[in-house]
Image (tube, helix red, strand yellow):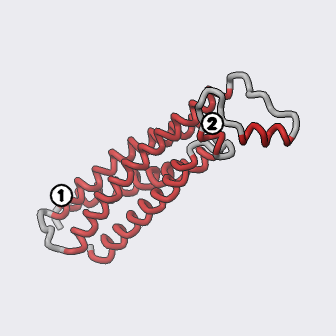
Amino acid sequence: MSTSDRILLILHIGFAIFTLGPLTAATMSTPRYIRKRNAPVVRFLNWTTRVYGLATLGIFLFGLGLAEGNFAQAWLTVSMTLFIVALALLLIIERDQRKAARLLEEAAGGAGTAPAPQPATAAEAEAEKSEPEADGASPAPAAAAGGEIAQVERGRLAALSGVVALLWLVILVLMVWNG
């Protein structure tokens, strides 16, 4: 192995260590902060995902340099394909984080207004549920879901971040086993 190959390998491994760890931590902890309705932290995790997601391209580029055009090896092609799939999933994760942060901020902004009057009795509460809105609008999705905000995004983030972490592990096994 030449000196330039060793440098590429060091950069490849260094980028993998210092980008995939924070990226995985940011994506996997986002659902917790959505549940806690902490919009500033969700915004920061979205920023972290964006920055470290772009930095993971360094892993791919240094890996291409190490491959030296020898793409006939199946493990290398599978690893690169899985990496591209993981990057595509990261785009979906970043979009859902951004949307969840926006929904949380909108809900927090709406919380500063005057609260809606609460019915005095359970019978009045049932009557309000069965009556359609006077202006023809339906209740907000957050209210319909029992006060849950960005529930769909939270679930999708939890699932996709787990899949992306699993893809990173499969790529690691392929690299170590066949490298």
- In this view of the protein, which residue sits in the foreground, 151 or 94? 151
The amino acid type, in three-letter code, at marker 2 is Pro
Residue occupying image coordinates x 33% and y 51%: 56
Residue situated furthest left in the rendering: 69
Quarter of the image for the C terminus: give it: bottom left
Q: Which mark is residue 139?
A: 2
Q: Element at badge 1?
A: helix
Q: Element at badge 2?
A: loop
Q: Which mark is residue 65?
A: 1
Q: Quadrant of residue 108?
A: top right
Residue occupying image coordinates x 23% and y 55%: 62
In the rendering, at what x and y percent does residue 168 appear?
39, 63
Of the two numbered discs 1 and 2 in the rendering, the one whose residue sits closer to the viewer: 2
Tell me the crowding category of disc 2: few under 14, some 14 to 19, or many 20 or more residues within 10 angstroms, Cα based: few
In the rendering, at what x and y percent does residue 57 appear?
29, 50
Q: Quadrant of residue 164?
A: bottom left
The amino acid type, in three-letter code, at marker 1 is Gly
- Determine whether 45 is above or below 21 in the image: above
Tell me the crowding category of disc 1: few under 14, some 14 to 19, or many 20 or more residues within 10 angstroms, Cα based: some
Calculate the distance from the C-alpha at mark 1 to the C-alpha at mark 2. 55 Å
